[in-house]
Amino acid sequence: MTEIDRLVVDGARSGTDNVVPYPDQALFLALRGAGQEAVMQGLWFYHHPVDLDAVKRFHRNLFGTLLARRIEPSRLPFGRHRWVSQPFTDSNLDVTELPRPRGEIYDWADEQVELPLDPQRGPAWRLGVQPLDDGTTVISLVISHCVADGAGSFLACAQASTGATRDLGLPSAGSRTRWSGIREDLRQFGRDLPEVGRTLRRAAKIAIRRRGELGTSAVPRSAHATEPRPVRMPTVTVFIDVAHWDACAESLSGNSFSLVAGFAGKMAQRLNRARASDGAVTLMLPVSDRADLEDTGGNVVSIAHVSFDPGTVTTDLSGARAAIREGLKNARDVPDEMMELLPLIPLLPKSSIARIADAAFGFTADLPVSCSNFGAMPAEVTVVDGTPAEYLCFRGVDRHVTSDNLDRRRGAMTVTSGKVGEKMTLTVISYQPGMENSRAELRGVMTETLKDFALSGEIV
């Protein structure tokens, strides 16, 4: 019996606290203020017939995981938001029988991302099934980043696949009357007040030291300015044999983690995301701080910032490996002072939250690349219809993103990776001002980068 199988929590623990943690409220408010939504998407590829009844059971079981919730904003402008339960509904299950061409995989995946999703009004996730004309069936799960991070989402999938569901013990939406909610939130504010006072003193020092970043946008506008228009950022995924991947890492004096970083860095260099001053590439590496399987935080991560020269990674990963080691140590030992301001989030206007988000999440002249490596995935995560999928990939996507927003950020690039069975999966999303920004162009960059490392794999 696996650890996932043993995780069955009957009922709520007494005194369950449904106050949304500061990082999750900050993310919710920052995205709402910018008119954007951040989601994660998993794509399961089944090359054998899919049991739709089992898929529907998986869908129902997800309502017994971290995904069975949404965010209820406080009625107070300075109040803390609350987690509330998401009751079962099948309105977020889309099963299609008409096959689509194999080449439209990511067209369909993008359409799934764009379907209605709301972490406040719910549901905050949705499941879709699409057959392809080559006999493959693709299953998509799109989850709002406001309710769960990558680790939390994979945990939810593993629990749903094994039936190890749990009751979070959350109240239903709207269960508080207007005045009872206001009174409860005022009491919560009183409990938070000492921490808010300490944070104000720290904020005054940080504001003086970093007033340039917080007073204006942290990112200079790109020279490739465009009129605002909706953008679908192109995506490509490569599946590489794990043995081939690990042998490459060892031959370059690295490990799987440093090879992911090196590969991301080399692609970033090809996509003009190297630092102008010295040619270095900066990666933002999310590190899970989730304490255990019962941690109900939404986004329980710290961010390590790692910079290295991508020019040497195809022959020697020791430089990237040392930079990662140092970056992870700093993330553990040196608290991010911008994250220390989070207790002030309920008190700030939306414009200030957006500026803090720019500074905290690295939208700077370094042109950072978000690079998430989930390591070896539990076998349970691959099971949606009661049997393991042949392939699984996953990505982080910005919904409703526009060209002017991407221009303000000077483009964007994300890399997500992990070992799924006998395959290493890497998914890259990229949009760079001044480039073609097509899947064909990004596929070409992926192909050339594979050649740089003498790697081969199946590109989707």
Image (tube, grey):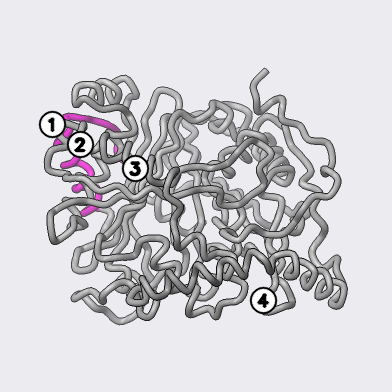
Decide if residue 87 is on the left or right side of residue 222.
Answer: right
Which residue is rendered at x = 68% and y = 63% of the image? 71
Q: Which amino acid does label 2 sit on?
A: Gly
Distance Cα–Cα, label 2 vs label 4: 46 Å
Distance Cα–Cα, label 3 vs label 4: 42 Å
Front one among 377 and 442? 377
Front one among 146 and 95? 146
Label drawn at residue 237:
3
- State the extent of the magenta-drawn residues as a range: 440-459
Q: Are marks 1 and 2 in contact (CB under 8 Å)?
A: no
Q: Do the residues labelled 4 and 1 touch (CB within 8 Å)?
A: no
Q: Where is residue 17 in the image (x, y as percent from the top left)?
A: 76, 53
Lower position in the chain sequence, tag 3 or tag 1: 3
Lower position in the chain sequence, tag 3 or tag 4: 4
Q: What residue type is labelled 1?
A: Thr
Helix or strand or loop: what does disc 3 sit on? strand
Q: Is residue 420 above or below residue 284?
A: above
Neighbourhood count class around disc 4 (C-alpha, 10 Å): few under 14, some 14–19, many 20 upward:
some
Label drawn at residue 315:
1
The residue at which mark 2 appears reads as 319
Would you identify the image quadrant in which residue 54 lies?
Answer: top right
Distance Cα–Cα, label 3 vs label 2: 26 Å
Q: Do the residues labelled 3 and 2 touch (CB within 8 Å)?
A: no
* Residue 460 seen from this side: no
Magenta-highlighted stretch: main secondary structure? helix
Q: What residue type is labelled 4?
A: Phe
Q: Where is residue 217 in the image (x, y as percent from the top left)?
A: 35, 76
